[in-house]
Amino acid sequence: MKVGLQINRFDYPGGNNKIGQNVHDASIAAEQAGFDSIWVMDHFFQLEHIGQYTDPMLESYTTLGYIAGITSKVKLGTMVTGVIYREPALLINAVTTLDVVSGGRAYLGIGAGWNEQEAKALGFLNPLQSRRFERLEDTLKLALQMWSGDSQSFKGNIYNLPEPYLSPQSITKPHPPILIGGGGEEKTLRLVAKYGDACNLFAHDIDILSHKLEVLKKHCREVNRPYEEIEKTSLIGVNIATALKDPQQTIDQAKTLKSLGIEHIIFANSHDIEASAYTKFSSTVQIIHDL
């Protein structure tokens, strides 16, 4: 079982001057501890269930580019990019650039978007009034076209591009894996079945998670897509400092997720900890790997 880490807060002790060093230390410690992937949220305001919306929040692709430069093995991605935040060709270029500079370690983490507060505050499209699922499907189709080397004109439901040329192409072949986040049963999971290499679902409620996976299986049957081709990932909130005191609870939770078919568990550590805590967590990471 793979183990990932979502770095989702940057309000480190020492203020803004220490953010870069703390991201550096946490990323290196996580890789050395055996984490398979590192993710950052693609948000511009902090989420209310984590902190205050005014808390520091780094731009995601700049941050991932920095992490790529100081690591060598971990996969890298956003968890996940709201499709309303960037024009699709710009997003595809950013992910391709991340893949190239990291030596083939990028995911395209993408979703329809939902956060009205930051969208309105910053002048983005309102995700709930922007035909977001049509935008998402257009972007997925365009990504596959551009990564195939086809620069013929693209005409989608929303976007029209005269010459979607991309150079360099990604190192990962045939392209960086497309992870689609969200559990919407009629639209999001259908798009996972059609275009996704991976899905991401919350692990808050095991019964709901199990149901979502069954819905995904149904969509896969309908589009004649092998369900086994899709990497099943799940995001789980955890206080790693607390988990160090009771690792068995975390291991048992991972076992339950594995029994449902989850292949990649991603810990969202929403508490400020020293980078050394990731090092101490390495034995738990190894046990989960071996499940």
Image (cartoon, grey):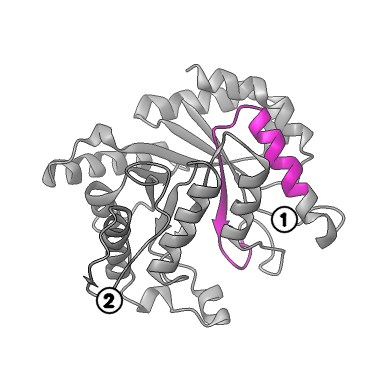
Return the x and y of residue 85 as percentages of the image width and height: 47, 70
Q: Left or right: where does residue 250 sit relative to residue 129?
A: right
| 137 w.r.t. 281: above or below | below
Return the x and y of residue 7 as percentages of the image width and height: 63, 48
Q: Label 2 is placed on what type of residue?
A: Pro
Q: Circle 1 sits in a helix, a strand or a loop, which is it?
A: loop
| 267 w.r.t. 42: above or below | above
Mark 2 sits on what residue?
162
Mark 1 sits on what residue?
10
Return the x and y of residue 148 as percentages of the image width and height: 28, 53
**Of the residues under marks 2 and 1, which one precedes in the sequence?**
1
Return the x and y of residue 104 as percentages of the image width and height: 47, 41
Q: Which residues are magenta?
A: 22-48
Identify the residue shown where x is 79% and y is 53%: 12
**92 or 270, which is in the foreground?**
92
Give the residue at the far right of this rendering: 14
